[in-house]
Image (spheres, rainbow, N blue to C red):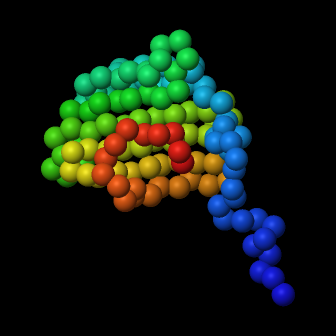
Amino acid sequence: MTSGDDDHPQHPEATDHTEVFGPIDPGALRTIRDLFVELEPLVETATLDDPLNPQTLTVELADGIRSASTARIEIRWSLTGNYAAHYTDEQNQNWLLHNSAKHVHCKAVNKPAQRYSGEV
């Protein structure tokens, strides 16, 4: 007797990250950047990693969670509506918020703060 979990695994294996997340939506990243700059007073900088073919938007903030004096949020947004936002600061707060077609997930990443690799 099985629980039926074999039909719907919790963490399906993917051979290509793009298949799961989908191709990046450069227009969405530009819009998100512009909204951060226009509406968030804590934004120091909001930059795309590549102006012609952006994959990640990096937002540097003048404040962070608790005693952190600065923070960084790295954002990816796909044409399929999937997104990932990675928060880090100098106090080693390291959070990843992402969605898929079926859920939204937020988790603490148990590693020192580093640049977002794009893996969700």
**Residue sitting at x 52%, y 34%:** 76
Name of the residue lying farthest toward the bottom? 1
User: Up-down: is 6 above or below 50?
Assistant: below
Above/below status of 89 relative to 59: below
Q: Would you say residue 35 is visible in this rendering?
A: no
Q: Residue at x 26, y 39 (%)?
A: 71
Taking the image as shown, residue 89 lies to the left or right of residue 56, namely left
Across and down, in percent, residue 59 comes to 35, 30
In front of the other: 97 or 17: 17
Rendered position, 25 above or below 6? above
- Please say whether residue 23 is visible from this viewpoint: yes
Give residue 95's position: percent from left, percent from top. Answer: 39, 51
Q: Which image quadrant for residue 61?
A: top left
> Quick check: 67 left or right of 99?
left
Along the viewing direction, whichever of 77 and 114 lies nearer the viewer:
114
Look at 56% across and 39% down and name the residue there: 83
Q: Residue at x 65, y 61 (%)?
A: 11
Q: Please, which residue is most extreme toward the front here? A: 15
Q: Residue furthest right?
A: 1
Residue at the extreme top of the image, as rendered? 52
Whole-percent x, y for residue 7 in the image? 81, 67
Q: How many marks?
A: 0
- Name the quadrant of the N terminus: bottom right
Taking the image as shown, residue 84 lies to the left or right of residue 87, namely right
Q: Measured from the top left, where is residue 26 in percent x and y? A: 57, 21
Rendered position, 119 above or below 56 = below
